[in-house]
Image (cartoon, coloured by chain):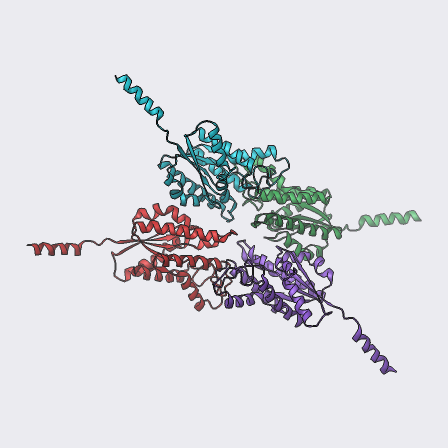
Chain colours: A cyan, B green, C red, D purple
């Protein structure tokens, strides 16, 4: 008898509707646009559906134009934690790097790390899986003359360190974009390879980001 | 008889005091400090004296702290042309690159080139020899995270193009400094290799600049 | 018997050491320096002791150089709430106004208000008394040519509105400083009236601020 | 006989076609737009024609978007002196004030005065009549919260001083605009009173500027 009961239990589990994992992409205008048709979040959703994993994930974007890391920190209770996500993909830093006009640059980079760390703490406490992304590009020129290259390298470096220090998966979009441009941007163009305007993703950029994101999410 | 007269003429020329060539170093605070004891201009002067060329050159610095290219243009009549130089070494661009916080960056780079070109025209009209120098560094870090690397590369590129377009000798200090740091700045330090503070030359920096300058002046 | 017991109870209360009210001054470098000898917090403490109110208040400064409103928000749990204050005096905005170089100024002012409001919410939830202060001056010139006058008036206006909207007491330091300078800064000096450098308080400035602060605290 | 000859000479002068005085408006985008239909230069031309002074003046605009005082200095030989004007109306300073993000503000204001003075010298040497204009507004709010009010007051002050020091007529557009807004901008609007966007003139603004300009030109 005992055997039979056990079997039914197994069957029950097998037919129980699986709870979908909620994935929130948390960021700035790039993520805001990523949720639009053709955006990188929509593309992740398509990839996932093609792989017959339906019922496994639910993707949502929480991107607001102009956001810096401290804006994410302010709105994370309402916009992220309240939605009880299983996975949060943090994609921030472009506005932080580009608007950093202060002379005392070290302090500002310090603050970026401080707020980023505070966000990670709040997510860890809730046992939420986290994926970090480096900010990609401000300008796609390959001859090291993009005005913000120095800042972008610095902020990307901070994100890489945070991933390592906290043992968290990293989607290194900056490295990906630099490599891609080295191959395909042979005319040293300011934009038009992976971005429309040097910052915001065109169709190819959204596809490249989606592939990297999906790879990281599946590997969790 | 004719022979005798000719000989006297030759003798006369040989004993006539040779007119010294006036060399003006025209720039910002780096050049202002270059004229101080131990500065790069003082070192060029020492090198030149060691080579037993005395009587051939006279070196003068015209550097003013904070100057950008348009400041040179404004004061060049009084500070350069009035002194009837034979050679002018233009060493400008660091302040232009670092203070360029405007969003409309292309226009600013355009203006840098426009004013630089106007200076070159005014010197050419007077048949003055010109040597161009690229701005060297703002920060000596070698991992591409100096905040101003993008701007510095852009402005250095403009100076390189101007040298080529006008067929003028170039002292490529930026390239020199990057190469030097690649070899000797193994700890990715912000300053202390060729500069005191990331911008202004220390003793080694003054020596390196002096050697490059003197090589270019002798080659004219 | 019951009467007697009651009396003892009353006596007990009368002799029970009164719990001191903890007052935290929460702000930037002005408050950091305010906690030093001769600073405004030290002066508030002296005023209070002169009034024979000993045992009633305990004053503490929590000012960090360079802080903007979002820095206060980040560190308020550790630096303010953990100390269980009865009264918090918020004195912030000078760095917010002066470092605001972005073109899109309205958004930045919006963010100032948003973070300020978030701080107020967190304090209200804990039933902590709050006093708001307007940022005072960046430059003491009286002819309306201080570079940051426009921003300072705007940010001071936001703080005034927040005080009114939340029905909270306001120490209007900006108005106080403008009035004081109108009377005493007859030579239109940049600094030296209430500040050492246009921003940080000199002895007179610390005294004026202390008097305003103490008045507000006593009135709660 | 002598009498008769003299008379003929007088008659000859009377019928000789009068040489028109060339007036050049020299400035930035405000002046560039001032030359368009409905712009302030077009309106000055209409006013002048209504007063039956035809043949007396010829008006031309030389405004380039984004120009600061040093841009005027660079292009004044080609764009102004080459056209042999009788009168030059200088209307510059708005971009100088608004783009001034450097920390070392005094130097920048110094440079504004230095370049402005250099322009005046070049015009005086050629005996050209000069009219100075203060930069008007960046933002029309009347409660002293326009971000650039401090800078604008400072730069307007420099122009006023230059007019006085050089004994030159001044069109004080800033004062005019502040007075006008005080009367008519009762709702403290950012723009829409004399400007479209806080800086560039709407129809009313062009009319007000034209009236002031024409008054000054007639008074020469």
Q: Left or right: where does residue B75 sit relative to residue C78? A: right
Picture mark count: 0
Q: Is the C terminus of chain D in the top left, top right, bottom left or bottom right quadrant?
A: bottom right
Q: Is residue B217 above or below residue D131?
A: above
Quadrant that contains the N terminus of chain D: bottom right
The front one of A86 and B198 is: A86
> Residue A164: in sight, yes or no?
yes
Residue C117 at x, y = what percent?
38, 52
Residue C210's place in the image compared with B89, above or below, is below
Please give left or right for residue D115 compared with residue D11 in the image: left
Residue most extreme to the right = B1
Q: Residue D116, image x and y in percent?
A: 63, 61
* Res. D56 image quadrant: bottom right
Residue A150 place in picture, x, y as percent: 54, 41
**Res. B189 in view:** no
Which residue is depicted at the point 37% across and 29% down? Answer: A18
In-front residue for pair A215/B132: A215
- Image-quadrant location for residue A83: top left
Q: Position of residue A106 (x, y in %)?
A: 48, 44
State the residue in front, C125 or C75: C125
Q: Is residue D167 left or right of residue C51?
A: right
């Amino acid at each position: 008898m005992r055997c039979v009961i056990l079997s039914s239990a197994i069957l029950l589990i097998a037919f129980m509707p699986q709870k979908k994992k909620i994935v929130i992409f948390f960021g700035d205008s790039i993520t805001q646009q990523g949720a639009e048709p053709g955006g990188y979040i929509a593309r992740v959703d398509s990839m996932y559906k093609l792989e017959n994993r339906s019922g496994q994930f639910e993707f949502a974007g929480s991107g607001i134009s102009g956001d810096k890391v401290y804006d994410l920190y302010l709105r994370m209770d309402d916009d992220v934690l309240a939605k009880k996500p299983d996975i949060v993909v943090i994609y921030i830093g472009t506005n932080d790097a580009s608007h950093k006009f202060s002379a005392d640059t070290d302090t500002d980079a310090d603050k970026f790390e401080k707020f980023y760390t505070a966000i990670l703490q709040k997510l860890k406490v809730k046992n939420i899986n986290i994926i970090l992304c480096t900010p990609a590009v401000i300008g796609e020129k390959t001859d090291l003359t993009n005005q913000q290259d120095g800042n972008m390298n610095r902020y990307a470096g901070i994100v890489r360190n945070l991933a390592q220090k906290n043992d968290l998966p990293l989607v290194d979009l900056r490295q990906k974009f630099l490599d891609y441009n080295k191959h395909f941007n042979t005319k040293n163009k300011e934009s038009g390879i992976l971005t429309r305007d040097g910052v915001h993703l065109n169709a190819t950029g959204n596809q490249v980001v989606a592939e990297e994101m999906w790879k990281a999410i599946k590997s969790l």
